[in-house]
Amino acid sequence: VKTVLISVHEKYWHMIKNGEKTLEIRKTKPAGIEYPFKVLCYVTGGKGIQGEFICKGTLVTNVFQQLCNR
């Protein structure tokens, strides 16, 4: 299983841990990776790696483009 590192702000990390934030939106997905893969969550501000999860897939959408074209 390959591993990807993502950077998350501390306030969002707490929301993820508490179950308040269940979706993470990124502009791009990791290139050339097969599912499932492990994700390490690096919390910014010198907090380091605070958690991990297995990503079983992604959803591709154009919502970002729609928001930028307003």
Image (cartoon, rainbow, N blue to C red):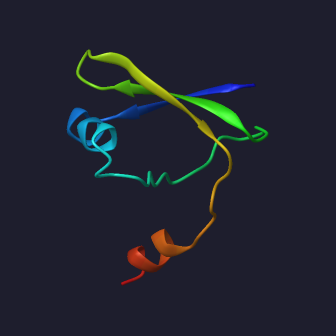
Q: Along the line of sight, which residue is nearer the eye, 34 or 53?
A: 53
18 vs 25, left or right, is left
Whole-percent x, y for residue 70 in the image: 36, 84
Relative to 65, is 46 above or below?
above
Q: Residue at x 75, y 41 (%)?
A: 35
Whole-percent x, y for residue 19 in the image: 32, 47
Relative to 4, is 23 above or below?
below
Whole-percent x, y for residue 17 in the image: 32, 37
Whole-percent x, y for residue 33 in the image: 76, 37
Query: Most extreme residue toward the front, as rendered?
Result: 19
- Total numbered labels placed on residues in the image: 0
Q: Residue at x 64, y 55 (%)?
A: 58
Q: Along the line of sight, which residue is nearer the eye, 34 or 32?
A: 34
15 vs 70, left or right, is left
Relative to 48, is 40 above or below?
below
- Please identify the quarter of the rendering in which residue 10 is found: top left
- Please identify the quarter of the rendering in which residue 2 is found: top right
Relative to 66, is 54 above or below?
above
Q: Along the line of sight, which residue is nearer the eye, 29 or 34?
A: 34
Q: Is the N terminus in the top left, top right, bottom left or bottom right quadrant?
A: top right
Q: Along the line of sight, which residue is nearer the eye, 43 or 21?
A: 21
Q: Residue at x 71, y 41 (%)?
A: 31
